[in-house]
Amino acid sequence: MLALQQIHKTFSTPQGELPVLNGIDLTLQQGESLALMGESGSGKSTLLHLAAGLDVPDKGEISIDGQVLSSLDEPARAKLRRQYLGLVFQQFHLVPSLNVIDNLRLQARLAGREDSEWTAHLLARLGLSGRETYYPEQLSGGQQQRLAIGRALAVRPSLLLADEPTGNLDEQSADTVLALLLELVKETRCALLMVTHSARVAAPLNRLVRLHLGRLEDHCS
Ligand SMILES: Nc1ncnc2c1ncn2[C@@H]1O[C@H](COP(=O)(O)OP(=O)(O)OP(=O)(O)O)[C@@H](O)[C@H]1O
């Protein structure tokens, strides 16, 4: 599903070269969930961006569903992202001018893969039935993140990439949102790569890896 082979990434900063990833190997199978942890600045978001094709590695190969990202130009990577990937971030990134149902449909529409039955099912599973015409600002943080998760899953992606998806929520909303995310991941049988600072959030996932000094350390979860 997702395969990273010997990934290296160094940023140029005003202070000089900053090596962040130094030979990352990682594979994720269909239906598998993986928590990515590591101290602040260790490169977790960088790794997630590379896996999403939002940035490119200096060296190494990334493939999604057998397609090698580095062999594609940006429009082709964007197409692959739309078709195969769901992205969820700490800031919900909903479109403020679109209501609930249009936000939910957005990615599927862009991918040309709208499925009204699945959208209606998702809306109910998100606990947002009856709120179709609300705008994001009229929803609680937990509701907004549930909607962002639904939007990411509306295309039935092969891989869901989530960067601190509960980082902006209080503990109770975080638990509800995480439980829903894991249920929907199971239901769609997609793979999940989730960045988190919280061992509690990481605990229910199948595997845990930690980024340290540019390399991945495997942990049993
Ligand atoms: N575009 C960039 N240009 C220069 N440096 C960058 C860039 N993006 C990230 N970095 C640096 O790379 C390092 C890793 O950043 P990254 O955001 O991946 O860490 P992180 O583990 O996700 O951190 P946090 O847990 O605080 O979100 C940091 O030192 C950051 O300043």
Image (spheres, rainbow, N blue to C red):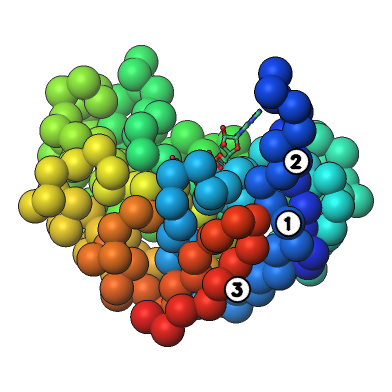
- Please report contact status of discs 2 and 3: CB closer than 8 Å, yes or no: no
Q: Is residue 10 above or below residue 24?
A: above
In this image, 91 relative to 110: left or right?
A: left
Q: Residue at x 34, y 54 (%)?
A: 197
Q: Is mark 3 within 8 Å of ligand 1?
A: no
Q: SS for tag 3?
A: strand
Q: What's the residue at 64%, 56% (across, down)?
A: 214
Q: Quadrant of residue 133?
A: top left
Residue at 34% across, 47% down: 165
Give the amino acid at mark 3.
Answer: Leu
Above or below 19: residue 207: below
Q: Earlier in the sequence, mark 2 or mark 3?
A: 2
Q: The disc labelled 1 sits on which kind of residue?
A: Asn
| Rendering coords of residue 92 (x, y %) | 35, 34
Compute the Cα span from label 2 to label 3: 24 Å
Earlier in the chain: of badge 3 and badge 1, it is 1
Crowdedness near tag 3: few (<14), some (14–19) or many (≥20) residues, C-alpha within 10 Å: some
Classify mark 2: helix, strand or loop. Answer: strand
Relative side of 59 to 39, left or right? right
**What is the quadrant of the C terminus in the image?**
bottom left
Q: Residue at x 75, y 62 (%)?
A: 23
Say whether residue 18 is visible.
yes
Find disc 3 in the rendering and name its residue: 28
Give the residue number, with chain letter if any, for mark 1: 22
Near-viewer residue (206 or 107): 206
Left-right relation of 197 to 58 = left
- In the image, residue 152 sits, relative to residue 130, either above or below, namely below
Question: Within 10 angstroms of label 2, few (less than 14), some, or many (20 or more) residues?
Answer: some
Badge 1 or badge 2: first in the primary sequence: 2
The image position of residue 15, as x and y in percent, is 69, 23
User: Who is closer to the viewer here, 159 or 59?
Assistant: 59
Choose between 214 and 148: the one closer to the eye: 214
